[in-house]
Amino acid sequence: MTAPGVSFGEQPSPGPGDIRVSADHDGLPELTGEVLGPIAPGLRGLDGVRDRIGVWRGLLDRPLTSYYLVLGITALLLGLGLVMVESTTSVADLIAGQPPLTDFKKQLLGAAVGLPLMWVAARSSPRLFRAFAYPLVAVSVVGLGLTLIHGVSVSENGAARWISIGGQQVQPSEIAKLALVVWGADLLARKERLGQLVDWRHMLVPLMPGAGLLCLLVMTGDDLGTTLILLVIFLALLWVIGTPGRVFGGLLILMALAVTLMIVTEKYRFERLTGFFGTQGSPTGADMQSIQGKYAIGSGGIFGVGLGAGGGKWGWVPESTSDFIFAIIGEELGLVGTLCVTFLYGGLAFAGLRIARRVPDLFCRLAATAITAWIVVQAAVNIGAVIGVLPITGVPLPLVSAGLSSLLVTLIALGMLMSFARLEPGAREALAARGPGWPLRVLSWAGLSKRRR
């Protein structure tokens, strides 16, 4: 009696679960037989997963992926920001005795002006951005200088960071961020073209004195948070250009000492830092903002209490419309809402660094990295301060917090990022294959577009 599939003197017939070994044309054995039957569904499942991964990788490898990622994430964050600003500022306006939509109308005006500016920036060439490098620095320096003049500057909470233009408050420190990005990237790109960056001193001069001047003027307005963002932009530019490690490390030590000095020389900053590392006080005392922000996030649970139903914005969470708007998001939209916001900024970081890696022009690479570092680090600092893992520095959440200057400048910077994405390899061909954009299609439907002969 023999086992199934086994015989002597003749070719065995395969039995269930049998494995047959045959040789291919190279003489190498290969496995065949019905044993592949029960394994095949699992293999097919793995193949299906592999195929799905291949599809997603194929989508990410498309030339215009970065462009649409930046566009989509910007639209989602801006939409969420308008909803949350309406939810928080309506309460703040009522408390201040103003009509409930006063501040929301300003934010809506900023979006209405900023989106066309972003569209123009997205379709502009890097040459146009570089032409504005020195004018932007000049406007920033003049604007920051005006904040030092009593009677010209506008003060809030003891800090003179704004000037009034046409009845609207403008914050020059926000313009300084964009100015440092464009001017620094243009400066280093010119030096690279002239072959001057072989000496590390050319990397720092005049970039370091210029960045130092902007930081000094911003700190004169008592704005440590924006100063830290300017330093992040400065370090991002030096990192991309290839600054030697010992020089980069020395700059980090120097900046850490300077920031420490700025903290210990100002009483309220020092108390804020010691309060972060020390024990927390009363929920209505000196640490009210931090404690009430955590209360608001914790009370939201998984799905939140619902849009507009949060109680933290009714005077319990200070600066709930700007610096601590993330706490109201956690209260009204819950853990799901906060995770979605965090993932959106993570996606923006991926898209921005992808653009910086793929774009061939050095200026675009430098500016894309600096813009990405600026927006993502600012978001991380804001979120970290709200959830209590970082000290409170007073920086807004990009595209979400209330603030006309911040919204306009951030939208222009993201438009620049989209412009750089259009220069990626294969992007021009993909745009040409896509056909005319929606404005031309609308004009064509209306019979107003010019027909090519």
Image (tube, helix red, strand yellow):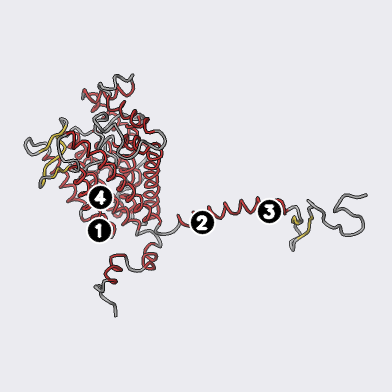
- Which residue type does callout 1 highlight? Val
Nearer to us: label 3 or label 4? 3
Mark 1 vs 3, N-terminal side: 3
Residue to which mark 4 is pinned: 182
Residue 254 in view = no
Secondary structure of the residue carrying tag 4 is: helix
Mark 2 vs 1, N-terminal side: 2
Q: Which mark is residue 55?
A: 2
Determine whether label 1 and label 4 are within 8 Å by CB. no
Secondary structure of the residue carrying tag 3 is: helix
Q: Quadrant of the C terminus?
A: bottom left
Q: CA distance from mark 2 to mark 1?
A: 33 Å
Please report the residue visible at 38 percent of the width from the left and 58 percent of the height from the top. Answer: 424
Q: CA distance from mark 3 to mark 2?
A: 22 Å
Mark 2 vs 4, N-terminal side: 2
Determine whether label 3 and label 2 are within 8 Å by CB. no
Residue 282 on image: x %, y %: 29, 19
Q: CA distance from mark 1 to mark 3?
A: 54 Å
Q: Which mark is residue 120?
A: 1
Mark 1 vs 4, N-terminal side: 1
Mark 3 vs 4, N-terminal side: 3
Q: CA distance from mark 1 to mark 4?
A: 16 Å
Question: Horizontally, is 32 left or right of 120 in the view?
Answer: right
Q: Residue furthest bottom?
A: 453
Nearer to us: label 3 or label 2? 3
Quarter holding residue 88: top left
Q: Residues within 10 Å of mark 3 (few under 14, many from 20)?
A: few
